[in-house]
Image: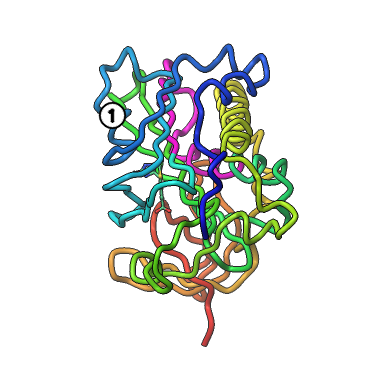
């Protein structure tokens, strides 16, 4: 797919498109042509420059995913966005933050006109069982004191492809992009507009999370959870567990009902839908 010429990321357009509150809460917006990883770029900043700092890039040469995977990040059509956030008081379990971020991304996608998307625990955004967006939240904290979160969002908008088949070599699981899902009448959707929606939802979500914690998001989680009450398989450290997904606990851990073991909480692992 050929990227639209007019769809270059533009920091001025993004800033001016933001609602007043988001504009006030965003301290810095840095737009890069090329970077290894926008998450790494935030982590490299001195601590005092990380809070409310957004880095966007047209291309990542070393885009990173969860579980030490890479994130395919070609130039010109997608969104690679990272936001640094300092939590001065560690009031709520930050292990729920990746779920809160996924909800914020889903809300932004709904505002962009998408329907039928949801979250595969902990934070894969899928449509029709295909991955549309991935989230990598990296936390650094010193015990009970302040913690910094680097929130990375990769959204496939208009996946560039030079040679048919080249993407299949780079992405090892079913994927999709937003323009394919929105249909031809919305194929011109602007990435600047999408970044505005993402930032508004992320900043509002972070504010709500800081005051109310994950419980303020539980109902949204339940409506977006693609696994709930389904038979799934969870792979953790080379071990497979099969069971029925029963939502998440207050720490964001997946609750899995396992025959003969009852409901067990898992804080990490890779989920697949169980099919025999
Ligand atoms: C995953 O699903 O495995 C998470 C993918 C996260 C990708 C984004 S792109 C912006 C930010 N920078 C990175 O290197 N990774 C995240």
- Is 260 on the left-hand or right-hand side of 147? right
| Residue neighbourhood size for the residue with mark 1, other residues' Cα within 10 Å, grouped as few (<14), some (14–19), many (≥20) | many
- Under 8 Å from ligand 1: the CB of mark 1? no
The structure's colour scheme is rainbow
Q: Is residue 226 magenta?
A: no
* Whole-percent x, y for residue 117 in the image: 66, 56
In the image, residue 96 above or below residue 68: above
In the image, residue 20 above or below residue 140: above
- Is 221 on the left-hand or right-hand side of 59? right
**How many numbered discs, if any?**
1
Q: Which residue is drawn at the image coordinates 52% and 75% (left, top)?
A: 259
Q: Which residue is drawn at the image coordinates 66% and 33% (left, top)?
A: 216
* Whole-percent x, y for residue 257 in the image: 54, 67
Q: In which quarter of the image is residue 36?
A: top left
Of residues 122 and 36, which is closer to you in this image?
A: 36
- In the current view of this chain or complex, which residue is farthest to the bottom? 276
Q: Which residue is drawn at the image coordinates 62% and 19% (left, top)?
A: 16
Q: Mark 1 points at which residue?
A: 43
- Is 196 on the left-hand or right-hand side of 233? right
- In the current view of this chain or complex, which residue is farthest to the front? 5
Q: Which region shows up in magenta? A: 81-103
Q: Does the magenta stretch include residue 97?
A: yes
Of residues 275 and 54, which is closer to you in this image?
A: 54
SS assignment at label 1: helix
Of residues 159 and 247, which is closer to you in this image?
A: 159
* Whole-percent x, y for residue 58 in the image: 41, 40
């Amino acid at each position: 797919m050929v990227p639209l010429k007019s769809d270059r990321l533009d920091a001025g357009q993004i800033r001016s498109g933001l609602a007043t509150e988001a504009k006030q809460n965003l301290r810095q917006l840095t737009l890069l042509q090329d970077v290894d990883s926008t998450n790494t770029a935030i982590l490299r900043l001195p601590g005092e420059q990380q809070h409310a700092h957004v880095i966007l890039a047209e291309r990542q040469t070393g885009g990173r995913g969860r579980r030490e995977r890479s994130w395919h990040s070609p130039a010109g059509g997608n969104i690679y966005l990272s936001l640094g956030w300092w939590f001065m008081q560690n009031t709520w379990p930050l292990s729920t933050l990746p779920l809160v971020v996924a909800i914020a991304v889903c809300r932004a996608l709904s505002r962009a006109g998408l329907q039928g998307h949801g979250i595969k625990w902990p934070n894969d955004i899928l449509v029709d069982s295909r991955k549309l967006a991935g989230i990598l939240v990296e936390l650094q904290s010193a015990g009970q004191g302040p913690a910094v979160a680097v929130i990375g969002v990769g959204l496939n908008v208009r996946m560039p492809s030079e040679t048919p088949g080249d993407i299949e070599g780079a992405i090892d699981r079913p994927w999709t992009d937003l323009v394919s899902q929105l249909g031809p009448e919305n194929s011109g959707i602007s990435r600047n507009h999408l970044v505005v929606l993402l930032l508004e939802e992320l900043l509002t979500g972070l504010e709500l999370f800081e005051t109310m914690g994950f419980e303020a998001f539980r109902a949204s989680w339940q409506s977006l959870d693609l696994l709930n009450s389904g038979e799934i398989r969870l792979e953790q450290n080379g071990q497979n567990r099969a069971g029925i997904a029963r939502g998440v606990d207050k720490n964001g851990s997946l609750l899995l009902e396992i025959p003969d073991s009852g409901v067990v909480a898992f804080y990490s692992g890779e989920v697949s839908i169980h099919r025999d």
